[in-house]
């Protein structure tokens, strides 16, 4: 496969995650220079090996240590980047009492401040469909949602993950509306994310499939998933 060299350098956060991993692969295939953040560089070799099975990175892939709960590392990671893809966000798997709001919201603001400071042109934030859930009314069809629809972060029974994604995206838009650097932002709100696995670690969305295959789901009501064309699988 021929690669057209590009001058742009992009940053992808949460480089060890499922979504970020495939984003890195896709960007490298398009010829971009890619930087990726990890909470610890101790995982760099593992992530590099997984990506190398998909694409030759050559010298176009760099890793930086940066944690959502710390200011350290973000300036260095962002400096010189044209675009930032912010994917990193905790899901709290196996930690039912974990505080997900602070790393999600505060980490997003840390990165936005660094991006604004270093004149990043475009900021792309991976939010979640759980941040745009209209209130459900018994007996009524769930209404369509758009950019004006927000999940009520204070509603009873809301998962900590949904609360964290809602508050983090709201904080991001509040920041952009007040930012004077000229940086633009787009948000992506995916639902369940499924696909090929690059490494042995299992992502949040793939956890369901993993548990089904391992017989770890004691009971499962009838359900189905739409494919990428929106049609029901046969």
Image: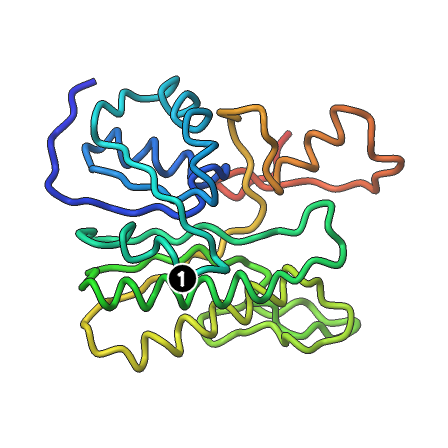
Q: Is residue 28 left or right of residue 153?
A: left
Q: How many marks?
A: 1
Who's the residue at 36% across and 76% down the image? Answer: 175
Seen in the picture, residue 88 relative to 156 is either above or below; the reply is above
Seen in the picture, residue 33 relative to 181 is either above or below; the reply is above
Seen in the picture, residue 32 relative to 101 is either above or below; the reply is above
Who's the residue at 41% across and 34% down the image? Answer: 22
Who's the residue at 44% across and 71% down the image? Answer: 147
What residue does disc 1 label? 71
Who's the residue at 50% across and 60% down the image? Answer: 69
Q: Is residue 30 left or right of residue 131?
A: left
- Image coords of residue 27 (percent x, y): 28, 36
Q: Is residue 31 left or right of residue 151?
A: left
Q: Nearer the viewer, residue 230 or 196?
A: 196
Element on which disc 1 rests: loop
Seen in the picture, residue 106 relative to 179 is either above or below; the reply is above
Give residue 152's quadrant in the image: bottom right
């Amino acid at each position: 496969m021929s690669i057209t060299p590009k001058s742009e350098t992009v940053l992808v956060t949460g480089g060890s995650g499922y979504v970020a991993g495939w984003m890195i692969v896709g960007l490298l295939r398009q010829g971009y220079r890619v930087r990726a953040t990890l909470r610890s560089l101790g995982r760099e070799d593992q992530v590099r090996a997984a990506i190398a099975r998909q694409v030759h990175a050559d010298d176009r892939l760099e890793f930086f240590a940066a944690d959502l709960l710390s200011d350290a590392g973000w300036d260095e990671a962002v400096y010189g980047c044209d675009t930032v893809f912010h994917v990193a966000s905790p899901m709290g798997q196996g930690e039912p009492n974990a505080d997900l709001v602070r790393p999600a919201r505060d980490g997003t603001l840390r990165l936005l401040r660094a991006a604004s400071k270093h004149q990043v042109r475009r900021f792309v934030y991976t939010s979640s469909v759980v941040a745009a859930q209209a209130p459900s009314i018994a007996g009524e069809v769930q209404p369509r949602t758009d950019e004006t629809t927000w999940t009520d972060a204070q509603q009873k029974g809301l998962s900590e993950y949904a609360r964290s994604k809602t508050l983090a995206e709201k904080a991001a838009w509040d920041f952009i509306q007040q930012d004077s650097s000229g940086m633009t932002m787009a948000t992506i709100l995916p639902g369940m994310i499924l696909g090929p696995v690059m490494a042995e670690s299992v992502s949040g969305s793939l956890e369901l499939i993993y548990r089904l295959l391992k017989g770890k789901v004691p009971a499962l009501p009838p359900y189905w998933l739409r494919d990428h064309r929106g049609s029901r699988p046969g």
